[in-house]
Image (cartoon, rainbow, N blue to C red):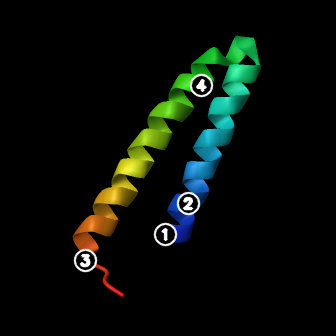
Amino acid sequence: MGGFLAFLLIAWLVLSVLGFVIKGLLWLTFVGIVLFVVTAIFLWLKRKTSGTTR
């Protein structure tokens, strides 16, 4: 699950950069940023509540 979420974070980051580079797709930047933040928060909350200690 962690690997999939890491993949999603990278995918959202790539979409954000593409949206920023291609001016006609500026909306893609905002969508990518929102999805990146939501995924990062989900990953942070999941990691915090799982109580993984090594």
Mark 3 in CB contact with mark 1 (< 8 angstroms): no
Q: Which of marks 3 and 1 is nearer the N terminus?
A: 1
What residue would you read off at disc 2?
6
Q: How crowded is mark 3: few (under 14 residues within 10 Å), some or many (20 or more)?
A: few
Mark 3 in CB contact with mark 2 (< 8 angstroms): no
Q: Element at badge 2?
A: helix
| Rendered image: mark on residue 51 | 3
Q: Choose mark 3 or mark 1, whichever is in front.
A: 3
Q: Earlier in the sequence, mark 3 or mark 2?
A: 2
Q: Residues within 10 Å of mark 2 (few under 14, many from 20)?
A: some
Q: Choose mark 3 or mark 2, whichever is in front.
A: 3
Q: Which amino acid does label 4 sit on?
A: Thr
What residue would you read off at disc 1?
2
Spatial CA distance of label 1 from label 2 is 6 Å
The C terminus appears in which quarter of the rendering? bottom left
Which is nearer the eye, 51 or 22? Answer: 51
Whole-percent x and y of residue 25? 68, 18
Q: Earlier in the sequence, mark 3 or mark 4?
A: 4
Whole-percent x and y of residue 28? 61, 25
Q: What residue type is labelled 2?
A: Ala
Residue at figure coordinates x 73%, y 12% from the top left: 23
Whole-percent x and y of residue 29? 59, 25
Mark 1 in CB contact with mark 2 (< 8 angstroms): yes
Q: In terms of image quadrants, where is residue 6? A: bottom right
Whole-percent x and y of residue 9? 55, 50
Q: Which amino acid does label 1 sit on?
A: Gly
* In the depicted structure, whether residue 33 falls above or below residue 48: above
| Rendered image: mark on residue 29 | 4
Residue at figure coordinates x 72%, y 12% from the top left: 24
